[in-house]
Amino acid sequence: MTNAAPVRRQVVDLYEAGHRQANIARTLEISGERVRQILDEEGVRRRSADEQRECDYRLAVSGKEAMIEEAFWELRDFDAVASRVGVSPDVVRRSLSELWPDVDVPRQARWAADRA
């Protein structure tokens, strides 16, 4: 098999970048079991569930931070921002909370201003 080495490298690279094993299998059109075998053979340490959730978040928000912030200042609604940017409302809330610990204050200020 001439492309075995590149596939092995891609599996390891994608996993180390935070991708889930099932996503790697779909992307590379190989079985999930083959992904697991390659990771084992390459000695790659597996992530815990908490580590995987952190990777999922980082992948979801990567490159979208500015879009999330800009949409939030316009819309001030997590669901609306999530819909516009293509991520979950939880990702929006966490991303903005990392910028401003009291992210609900501007949301509530908007809500109060809309009611006045």
Image: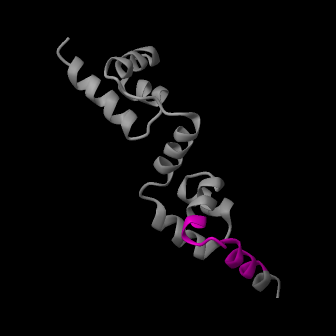
Q: Is residue 45 left or right of residue 76?
A: left
**Which residue sits furthest top?**
1
Query: Does residue 74 show up magenta in the picture?
Result: no
The magenta segment is 96-111
Question: Which of 95 and 63 lies nearest the eye of the viewer?
Answer: 95
Question: Which of 14 and 25 lies nearest the eye of the viewer?
Answer: 14
Q: Is residue 63 left or right of residue 80?
A: left
How far across and down, in percent of the image, does residue 77 sit? 68, 67
How far across and down, in percent of the image, does residue 110 sit? 72, 80
**Which residue sits furthest bottom?**
116
Tell me the residue at 49%/54% (across/down).
61
Query: Does residue 100 show up magenta in the picture?
Result: yes
Q: Main secondary structure of the magenta part?
A: helix
Tell me the residue at 67%/78% (across/down).
106
How far across and down, in percent of the image, does residue 100 sit? 59, 72
**Which residue sits furthest right?**
115
